[in-house]
Amino acid sequence: MQLGVIGLGRMGQIVVDRVLAAGHDVVAFDLDDEAVAAAAEAGADPADSIDDLCEQLEGTKRIWLMVPAGAAVDATLEELEPHLEADDIVVDGGNSKFQDSVRRAESCPAAYLDCGTSGGPAGAELGFSLMVGGPEAAYAELEPIFDAVATGPDGHGHMGPAGSGHYVKMVHNGVEYALMQAYGEGFELLHEGRYDLDLENVSRVWNNGAVIRSWLLELCEEAFREEGTDLGDVADRVEGGSTGTWTVQEGLEQEVPVPLIYTALAERFGSRADEGRFSRRLASRLRYGFGRHEVPREE
Amino acid sequence: MQLGVIGLGRMGQIVVDRVLAAGHDVVAFDLDDEAVAAAAEAGADPADSIDDLCEQLEGTKRIWLMVPAGAAVDATLEELEPHLEADDIVVDGGNSKFQDSVRRAESCPAAYLDCGTSGGPAGAELGFSLMVGGPEAAYAELEPIFDAVATGPDGHGHMGPAGSGHYVKMVHNGVEYALMQAYGEGFELLHEGRYDLDLENVSRVWNNGAVIRSWLLELCEEAFREEGTDLGDVADRVEGGSTGTWTVQEGLEQEVPVPLIYTALAERFGSRADEGRFSRRLASRLRYGFGRHEVPREE
Amino acid sequence: MQLGVIGLGRMGQIVVDRVLAAGHDVVAFDLDDEAVAAAAEAGADPADSIDDLCEQLEGTKRIWLMVPAGAAVDATLEELEPHLEADDIVVDGGNSKFQDSVRRAESCPAAYLDCGTSGGPAGAELGFSLMVGGPEAAYAELEPIFDAVATGPDGHGHMGPAGSGHYVKMVHNGVEYALMQAYGEGFELLHEGRYDLDLENVSRVWNNGAVIRSWLLELCEEAFREEGTDLGDVADRVEGGSTGTWTVQEGLEQEVPVPLIYTALAERFGSRADEGRFSRRLASRLRYGFGRHEVPREE
Amino acid sequence: MQLGVIGLGRMGQIVVDRVLAAGHDVVAFDLDDEAVAAAAEAGADPADSIDDLCEQLEGTKRIWLMVPAGAAVDATLEELEPHLEADDIVVDGGNSKFQDSVRRAESCPAAYLDCGTSGGPAGAELGFSLMVGGPEAAYAELEPIFDAVATGPDGHGHMGPAGSGHYVKMVHNGVEYALMQAYGEGFELLHEGRYDLDLENVSRVWNNGAVIRSWLLELCEEAFREEGTDLGDVADRVEGGSTGTWTVQEGLEQEVPVPLIYTALAERFGSRADEGRFSRRLASRLRYGFGRHEVPREE
């Protein structure tokens, strides 16, 4: 099968490599010439523009977008549009907001698949987990490609109609925030608690047979091994938050409580409050108000 | 009525003043001679020891303890014990753990009343809210004293058997933590949000007729008036926490969820984590683990 | 001063009564003829249409809308629009979303004031708390009206530009959710805990001098007096939630954590999950998965 | 090596089987004769009393307790005590409170190892995760046994001094509660949300390559496969909670916030509030108090 790939960043390059390794053909394009050259060296046919890429694709076009979520997806689709026909298939493998995917599916002349992708750079060897939304026939036609990009046939699935792939990925990420914070609470208690523990040792033992074993816990073990049991100079500041925010917003709209996901997200916000949390400053001052407790002041 | 008062700190002095103002007699003792002198100047009979205080009390003894919760209460009771008989009444007006009050009530030769006291220094003028546990007859006998120390007859009540007064006070304080944090969240959102608001103005308007008006909100208004709308140099550090901790512990034992009280307490703990929250540092490192996101480092 | 009032439900009628009582003139309209008749009986000039109301207003028009938030406000403004000039003033006293108020302020030919109103039916006697956003000159011109509708001059204030009045009211309501839930946690612990307590008694004592005294606590006292200490047949189901949802959404956009407000809102959602919480059903099944604990089943 | 095993329930039997399979000798005792007979059939030497078991152990005694946490452990230790000498080793492989283990280690005449065990019945094939506290020399001496009971050498570790094994296991379980609830929130949102999703399909795809893949997620997949995507008649009621409660209590003592673990535990409590949550009933009534919103009543 021949696949066009647009967007050759870390994740796009992995897609190219895995599709080539499975014996398919790839036409590759990126705004960055060096990324295109790297893909060519790996065995892809280089394209120097979206027009060029479309011309190199023979028969019905199958195109995988791996560009940053947001405006870049819309810009790419706009350029693709004149080349697309109803039989063609476009896959958005990025981290798009599911509402955007629903909108794009409606206006795209080709079949449009929204594909949530999880696994990160580690997917280069293992393959990704792919959650796909959109027309079932288009999904079925691309199965050989999904087999190659995913961990295999079990690593991808058709979730439902347009948007459902990115919807499931959004919720995946919300859960991810909560899992990270849950492990973090446990390790914080072990770190601050009454024993002097080697957290790499703890996580190693847990990863071998304990109920809470997981890939994230393997990453904890790796973190303690590489940074030390006190995490060295890693700062108390957690960036990111868009997919978690979307998950909580969807929970509000559906009236579904997601307090753990909310709390994990709020910890990120709190970690970025550089001048301290106003709520706590007020609480401190109120303790003076009713009890004449001394007010801690910034020096 | 004649009342012995042991413990003449800020709160004990207010008890003395209010009881005297209501026309009763007071014999006052404190380990600090100056505090005793101040009470004497206010009209109390000074005592230079607990023995002396007991000797000055005529007939059945009524004694109000206003000493720091914990060991000081036990030490005082131990000294009092040889002087006490079954008809006497001892009131613990401090912030004791209710389990301690149950234990003390069992071993005290006199009737023992545990009296939760709320209102802080502002109670000097208004009177306090008094939640009283212990034998009902003893409570009834002391009503004239409670009328004087409280805001009046409505400001005190008999809650139930031994320990119930401090139990209700413990829960009062747990709620207090949550209320402070709830107002804090609202003002934080107003402060960080999209309008440039005068928070003294906001709280003044709210305090006049709004559903959330309260004494704590009046203290917020005062805080913004005195510190400025951005709370000046008040630090993000909230001290205290014992009664809140007891409340959450009781919730665990009774299997009653108190998530707002817990969260308010956890904010205090978090405000005192001087080296940052370990859980957030781990989350930050894990984002590198699965997504190669840059790790923020301490400089 | 002459004021047109559109919308004569419970709250609108109170506005009419208070403005009349302060010696002003009112022209009143509602889609419901009986409501107009009631207003007329109270001393207002009745109008049988918005056109009629506008014609009865002399000189620059001052009009107070007290219609349900949402489409009704837009529909009323559309009808008003041909009658409005730049010198006129329209007040939206309802519970509108602040973003809607910003939009309406931009398109309204008259000066537009968004006025958050708190106090509920109890405001009939006490007056309301009014948080007003929009042009300062318009606010100043209407001060006599605000004095009448509010508890007095202290019961209203100019918050800032368009939308800020409803913004502050939105946050007020978010805090209100959290305060209610905080008191609820305390009383739940007292109710389920180890003493047999009279909760009307507890709340009465707290309302007299305790740190957590408030109007909401007075309403708790009233509730226990009227329903009994176990709240009789009041169901575990909390309706409402729009302003709380908006508050959390704004917290997400501003990256300000509001965990107490979120939790209080989530409790409402949870109370309406008629078929049980899916998350808990899954947890129950997982306990079988890893520990062979028996799974509770619906009968 | 020869090992005495006391307690032949599901977990104890697995210990016996795995130790025998590794080529060691086992002397087995349980109060239930049938359990002893089953162990004998598997190849263990049966004992008909603790005395008998001790007599059958040659040289220094190594004894593994797998009895229910609490009084049963103390009762067993009391019976063992006359037989124990300083060179002997006792392992408590149950779910004991770490404070109990510290106390027992102090009074036990033999070396005492507290061994947190995770993995549940699935450990029969895979082996367990073993977190061991107590004297390092005793741990080292028993390594062949731990190799057999655990997944292998990586599945066990020496955590630190007495109590640390059960301490780490306690925190493990606290994290476990939070992870279960985190997955539960995600699946609840997917179940109640805007797509009609097959949750077995979702969890299968996630388990193959996604960041949140884990053993608990495999158990979710199994649950959806066996119960259906809506979990059939599984009830909204989560039993258990002791280790989670201990974890939160330890967080309170160490002043370490564990809001996700707390929330997960509180969900369990809430799921067992058969007459509804009092806090929500009060909130519902308060909405009438300030806004005259209709009160939902039980029929």
Image (cartoon, coloured by chain):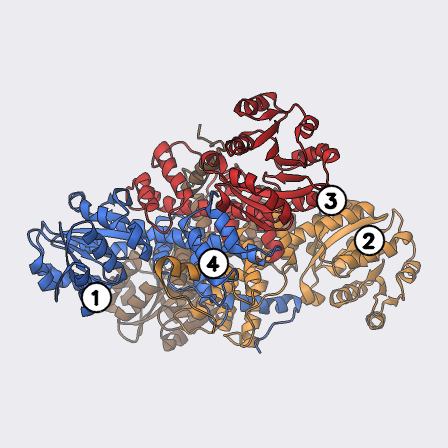
Chain colours: A blue, B orange, C brown, D red
Q: Chain of mark 3?
A: B
For badge 2, the amino acid type reads Val
Q: Judging from the image, what secondary structure is the residue with disc 3 in?
A: loop
**How many neighbours does mark 2 have within 10 angstroms: few (below 14), some (14-19), or many (20 or more)?**
many
Mark 3 vs mark 1, CA separation in Å: 78 Å
User: Looking at the rendering, in which quadrant would you find the N terminus of chain B?
Assistant: bottom right
Which residue in the structure is indicated by mark 3?
A: B161
The residue closer to the viewer here, C191 or B272, is: B272
Q: Amino acid at mark 4?
A: Arg
Q: Secondary structure at mark 4?
A: helix
Q: Chain of mark 2?
A: B
Residue B130 position by quadrant: bottom right
Q: Which numbered dot is residue A35?
A: 1
Q: Are marks 4 and 2 on the same chain?
A: no
Residue identified by numbered label 2: B90
Q: Which one is in front in this view, the residue at disc 4 or the one at disc 3? A: 4
Callout 1 and callout 4 share a chain: yes
Q: At label 3, which amino acid type do we have?
A: Pro
Three-letter code for the amino acid on which mark 1 is drawn? Ala
Earlier along the polypeptide chain: callout 3 or callout 2? 2
Q: Is residue A93 left or right of residue D66?
A: left
Q: Residue at x 68, y 28 (%)?
A: D50
For the residues labelled 3 and 2, the Cα–Cα distance comes to 15 Å
